[in-house]
Amino acid sequence: MPCEVAARFLILYGSQRGQAQSIAEEIGQQAAEHGFTADISCLSNQHKYNVDHEIRPVVFVVSTTGDVDPPDTAQKFVRKIKNKSLAHDHFSHLRYALLALGDTNYANFCNGGKTIDSRLQQLGAKHFYATGHADDGTGLEVVVDPWIEGLWDALKKLFSSMSTSNQQGTDLRDCTQDNYHKNASGQEKNKSDLEVDLHLLKLSEVDSEKGKTITSDTSDVETLSTALVASLKQSVPTLSESVLNVPALPASYLEVHLEQGSTEREQNIAYQPGDAFDILCPNRASEVEELLLRLDLQTQNNCAVQVNLLKNSSKKAAKVPLHIPQNGSLQFILTWCLEIRSTPKKAFVRALADFTQNGSEKRRLLELCSKEGSADYNSFVRDANVCLLDLLRAFPSCLPPLSLLFEHLTKLQPRAYSAASSSLQHPGKVHFVFNVVEFPARPEHPARTGLCTGWLADHVSSILRPLGTVPASEHLESGLIIVHVRPRPSSTFHLPADPSIPVVMVGPGTGVASFIGFLEQREKEREVNQEATFGETWLFFGCRHKDKDFLFREELERFAHNRILSHLIVCFSRDEPDAAGTLNSPTYVQHNLRLHAKNVASILLKDKGCLYVCGDAKNMAKDVNDTLLEIIGNELQIDKLDAMKIVAGLREEKRYLQDIWS
């Protein structure tokens, strides 16, 4: 009897905030439906796997944290595979696929996954399926869903090749490569033009638990409106008349019981300028109360919560979420533990449909999570920043159990803010700056502010004061609030250890916060060591209006007056030019960088100085990066490609550093 290869593969994930883990678990869950057995592990659990000798196919799911780094859980693995003593064929036995998660708002898109991918290739590992690069800026599911669907055919082909190799006694490496480099016609492909088709699989006519093909049943579904404008609540032809391919119903795995039935501490937190702090903010009390009312649990808000695994769950590697404390009150968990503002993923929408009584409402939820309804999901759910409460308002007959929320709502994440102070200047204190994020009213949801910035704004409104006035001390004391924070040290976004090295800082808007800490630090260092040599400091600042949002104006002008800040270069994008202004006056920070191109180039290329960029990733950071390429290209008279190599070198030397956010 010929020997057969067991259809078993390994999933390894590196996750910072749970997205990569969730996707890896989804792959593991779907594996059984396609006839595979999947073992799954976090990359940090190196005692549970050994890729040095792994003969099973391996699927990596890896996110990126910050601008360039693999997630913390993957750092040890990355250091291991980057060991320069490893032979060039160290992983020649390894067949793998990799799904990288990233955000195109950042300069180094999917760099965490790309780092692992390129290093595995250098050490002889081979793809059995094309690498996927999913963009959180446009919606991870746009790439993730088809990538997962195409994975199953790729695995089947690989296992078939492995089985054939075993039967014929041929080398697995040769067989896999032969199979991999042939196109659909069986013709040999040039290995430098290697491609793998990412196609969409069609769901078969199986029971609803496995992904049923859903049709419109006139006996159960009410007649939809004939309005020609689609909305969250309703669709229009042809979608409303389509046969739907919906995702498989996620397996339930938790049971929740409600049973009848914080300490504060001060810390002297050490930090450096350039570090950030995580603020742990609660969900809005009004939204928690509305959710409790909607779920008919308002009288049980103080009940202790017990969460256990369902005994007969089909979910692979199911476990009680660590962010849900046992015996915490329901009110506490909904307030401090679950991200009730997060946009429901398609799997959650699919599950909600099963707890919706009204036929037309159920049909619409099924449309939104189906392949055919992807455009509507993007328009009316993801792009509209719809949350669970918005869906429950739009679909009144949907009444999900508490266990479903605990299974699908992610951990309430802290929000990071850069320190706007130096601990040398303010021992035991940290300052930070925020803008209130506003989401205008839409048909899908009412007007609201950002979760953390809105919460902070509500609490500080009583102690805000006009510029130049000093509040009474008793009023200030009575207005103090408790904000839960924890340090988030930066390994790179710090001033150079040698104070003689010149620095260029680019920080429009609230991006200036970190640089206030830099300048306070330099001021204190000068006081302590007056004989030391200090390099030049340049700050490029910009805002909309000089008289309305020129943050830290008094402090910056004082730094400039005292020569702590060598050059303060400012611009205002919405102010009219004064009498001396021209149509070509600088509008944004990148325009001022161009005006001072020779100084910037000299600092970076001749004086070995550092460039720091802090603020918006979506527009500003990209524009500054493009301007830097232009400056270096013009200064050295080189083309863009060579300029990009020099900028990459600055990044590697930690002399071009970014602290940016989307």
Image (cartoon, rainbow, N blue to C red):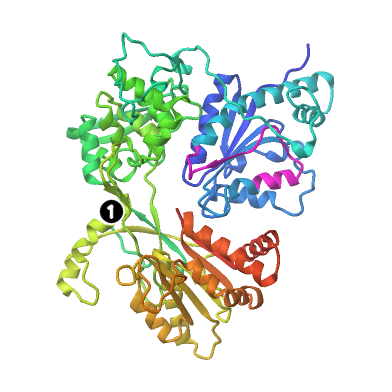
Q: Residue at x 17, y 74 (%)?
A: 473
- In the rendered view, tell whether residue 613 sits above or below residue 187: below
Q: Residue at x 29, y 47 (%)?
A: 440
Horizontal and vertical percent for residue 455?
A: 27, 53
Q: Secondary structure at mark 1?
A: helix
- In the rendered view, tell whether residue 285 sits above or below residue 557: above
Q: Is residue 531 left or right of residue 242?
A: right
To which quarter of the image does residue 157 belong?
Answer: top right
- In the rendered view, tell whether residue 311 sits above or below residue 621: above
Pick the residue in front: 315 or 229. Answer: 229
Q: Is residue 366 left or right of residue 630?
A: left
Badge 1 is on which residue?
A: 454
245 within the magenta span: no
Q: Residue at x 75, y 29 (%)?
A: 180
To which quarter of the image does residue 297 belong?
Answer: top left
Horizontal and vertical percent for residue 501?
A: 58, 78
Query: Is residue 354 in view from this perspective?
Result: no
Pick the residue in front: 149 or 638. Answer: 638
Q: Is residue 511 left or right of residue 219?
A: right
Q: Is residue 613 left or right of residue 159?
A: left
125 within the magenta span: yes
Quadrant for the N terminus, please: top right
Residue furthest toward the top? 219
Query: Is residue 560 in view from this perspective?
Result: yes
Instruction: Report the amino acid beneath label 1.
Output: Gly
Horizontal and vertical percent for residue 28?
A: 55, 29
Read off the magenta span: 116-140
